Image (tube, grey):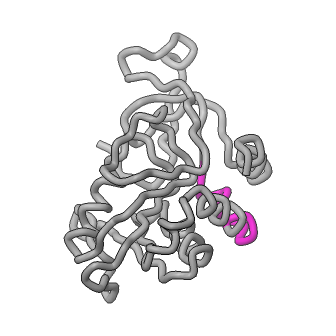
Amino acid sequence: MLDEEVLAEFRAADALLEGHFLLSSGRHSTRYLQCARVLMDPMRASRLAAAVAAKIPRELRKEITKVVSPAMGGVIIGHEMGRALGVEALFVERPEGTFELRRGFALAPGDKVLMVEDVVTTGLSSREAIAAIEAAGGKVVAAAALVDRSAGTVELGVPFYPLIELNFPTWAPDELPPELAGTPAVKPGSRARP
C-alpha cells in the first residue's frame, strides 16, 4: 500500500484531524491521526493490517507465533495483525499503572512475538509493552505500527515496521507558534496525561 493510499484510508474515515492537539508526548501539533476511527470499519482494518504484514520480511513473518499489542489503541490493529499472520493476538494492559498481559493470557516460553501499536511517537508505550512481553516469557522479534510519528528516530531495540511515516510538525509548550498559542489544545487519544 502506497503512502497516499494509506492517507486516503484515513481521510475516508474522517480520521485525519486538523486543529490544535496536545499529544501524549506532551508536544503540540496541528494534525492528529485518530487511528480508532480508521479501524472502526472491519474491512478497512483488515486491509491496513495486511499492508503492515506485507512490510515485514517473509522469513521474519514465518517466525512469529503470537501478536501482542498494548491496550487500548493497539487492540484492534493487533487483532487484525493476528488474523493477517494466522496467529493468536493478545494484549497487555495497565491495571496497576504498568503493562502486563491481560488476565488469562499467557505466552509459552520462547514464543516469538510481534508487538503491534497503532501510532508510535516517542516509543515509550512500545518499549513498556516489549518489556512486559519479555517479562511474561515471550521473545519480541519485531515491532510494527500503522503510523510512525517519530520522524524515523524511534529506537525500540527490535526491527520496526511501520505502514507509514508521518512527520507532522510538533512543538513543545514553550515554543508554540502564535496561531496555536491563542487557541486551546484538544487532548485526543486514550493515554492518561499529566
- Residue at 54% x, 23% y is 183
Please, which residue is most extreme toward the bottom here?
104
The outermost residue toward the top is 178
The quadrant of the picture occupied by the C terminus is: top left
- Front residue of 82/12: it is 82
Please, what is the dominant secondary structure of the magenta stretch? Answer: helix
Q: State the residue at coordinates (51%, 74%).
A: 62
**In the shown orientation, is residue 57 left or right of residue 124?**
right
Q: Specify the segment rendered in magenta.
A: 34-45
Q: Is residue 43 magenta?
A: yes
Query: Measured from the top left, where is residue 66 in percent x and y?
Result: 43, 77
Say left or right for 83 vs 43.
Answer: left
* 188, above or below 190, in the image: above
Is residue 108 rendered to the left or right of residue 183? left
Residue furthest front as drawn = 59
Q: Tell me which corner region of the image, top left, top right, bottom left or bottom right, holds residue 106.
A: bottom left
**Vertical placement of residue 10 versus 77, above or below:** above
- Report x, y in % for residue 187: 48, 42
- Rendered residue at 68%/48% (across/down): 15
Spot occupied by residue 166 in the image (x, y as percentages of width and height): 58, 36
Q: Residue drawn at (24%, 68%), measured in percent from left and top?
A: 134
